Amino acid sequence: MEKEIQRSITLRISRRGDRSNPTSHFTNGEGGFLSSGNFSSDYPSRIMWKHGFIRLVLVAAILWMLLILVVLLFHVWSCQSSYAFFSAICNKESKVYNVLNTWGFVAQQHRCPIPVANNPNKIVIPEGGTPDKIVKNLSYFMEDELVNNGSQPSPLFGGHQSWSQREESFKLNSSMKVHCGFMRGGGTEMDPMDIKYVNKCRFAVASGIFDGYDVPHQPSNMSDRSKKLFCFLMVVDEASLDFIKENATIREDSDGGLWVGMWRLVLLKHPPYDEPRRNGKVPKILTHRLFPQAQYSIWIDGKMELIVDPLLILERYLWRGKNTFAIAQHKHHRSIYEEADANKRRKRYARPLIDLHMKIYYYEGMEPWSLKKSTISDVPEGAVIIREHTALNNLFSCLWFNEVNLFTPRDQLSFGYVVDRLGGAFKFFMFPNCEYNSLFVLHPHTREHSSKVEWVKSLSEFKGSGSNMKESRGGLGLWTPYPGELDSVMLPQVVRTSKAG
């Protein structure tokens, strides 16, 4: 009996040991046994691998977030840096900027609500237009006068304006005759078919593409009223027309006109300048010459997509405040000398020629912008220009273009100078930059612009009168002896206090 009791106790202890024993056995698929020793050695390693992978993912995510933060902070710092290499990151046309923007590392443009009217159909268009009070009769030189030796110079689109003619053009009179491009034989011929079409346009949204740097971007949010009221005119040269034909759908109307969506293509044959950027200033600044019947125009650069109804734009920027000319304030700069310094850093034109341009302006009395001036800024963001084609506005556009024709193609350097020379007679509305960014969507160029003249560092690189580094048909004021002593002119010091726009 005692032996049976002992055997029962022994069996119970054995069973308890089996339950608590980590080395118990498991059957395999064939009815045999597998030792749990193999399982116990594999299981912890799998758990460790799983936990390690999770930690790795978390660490990678944290490092990625830190990298993004570092890049953003570096981008902000580089915009403030005085080093040209770092400040180039802020250049919106640079490859570095485009890569950062593609990765999502670049802060988006600052936009703000535009206080526009709600319904384009309810806008009342003023009748008659703004009366001309200062300049009542404006005409243009169409042919150059004979030079001193009696020979006729080769035709230039901008003409051979003398320094005395330039000085006289700033003296306001009720009747004036000035240079304003379009000299006979100087280039920029428009097809008679296009001339017939644009002469019907009273309201125009104009843009331009030169040397195939862009494709037309279709305006959006357009009302049916604006579609009927406005002509959407895209000015192109022959190289751009060929490029657009290869990369966009073009339709031809019954009159032979070419269209890309809403845009009517207007071809300008025989570009007047060597520099595509300078060619682009013709439709941009001389809109009233290309479209002489237009009473109102809105210019947008070719890389922009308009997203606000043009009737709302005219009501907001012209009619509501009884303005006749509106342009946005530059995001970063107010002084032309600060803008010139930024242009040199970003290699937008030959550095010594920008300096020469600014020396002429400083010699002629153009002071850096300060709070003492009556204007908000001397530097506009010129990619959007809204204007009524009054005689004074047309005169201003001619004088502005003449400066671009004579000096550098950087029109932002000349705008404030012409305003200053007109002594406050030219009134304009300069609106906040954040509203400017709310008018359109900015698209990148199809390729990066580059020309040899942008990389020139000294005047010695322009050797001889026939140097291929010089533009042959523009910027001639930089190579014509100036009637003043510029050697002693010291440009005002620029303290860089803003981002490189």
Image (cartoon, rainbow, N blue to C red):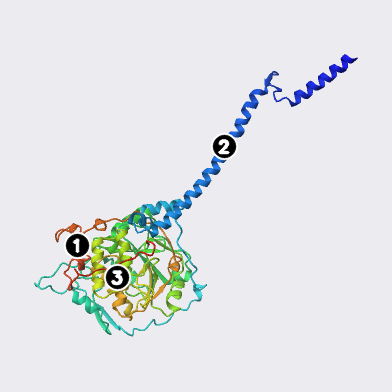
Q: Real-space Cα distance between discs 1 and 2? A: 68 Å
Q: Residues within 10 Å of mark 1 (few under 14, many from 20)?
A: some
Q: Earlier in the sequence, mark 3 or mark 2?
A: 2
Numbered mark located on residue 52 in the image: 2
- On the rendered structure, is 335 left or right of 355? right
Question: Which amino acid type is shown beneath numbered disc 3?
Answer: Ser
- Between 402 and 252, the one nearer to me in the picture: 402
Q: Look at discs 3 and 2 and give the one toward the viewer.
A: 2
Position of residue 47 measured from the top left corner of the image (x, y, whole percent): 61, 34
Position of residue 143 measured from the top left corner of the image (x, y, whole percent): 19, 73
Q: Secondary structure at mark 2?
A: helix
- On the rendered structure, is 169 left or right of 80? left
- Residue corresponding to mark 1: 472
Q: How many marks?
A: 3
Numbered mark located on residue 414 in the image: 3
Q: Residues within 10 Å of mark 2 (few under 14, many from 20)?
A: few
Contact check, label 3 and label 2, Cβ < 8 Å: no
Q: Look at discs 3 and 1 and give the one toward the viewer.
A: 3
Position of residue 450 measured from the top left corner of the image (x, y, whole percent): 29, 55
Q: Real-space Cα distance between discs 3 and 2? A: 63 Å
Q: Residue at x 43, y 52 (%)?
A: 102
Any part of residue 291 in sight: no
Asked which quadrant contains residue 153, the reply is bottom left
Question: Which amino acid type is shown beneath numbered disc 1?
Answer: Ser
Question: Which amino acid type is shown beneath numbered disc 2?
Answer: Gly
Q: Secondary structure at mark 3?
A: helix
Contact check, label 1 and label 2, Cβ < 8 Å: no
Compared with 495, 18 (above or below) is above
Compared with 125, 355 (above or below) is above
Q: Earlier in the sequence, mark 1 or mark 2?
A: 2
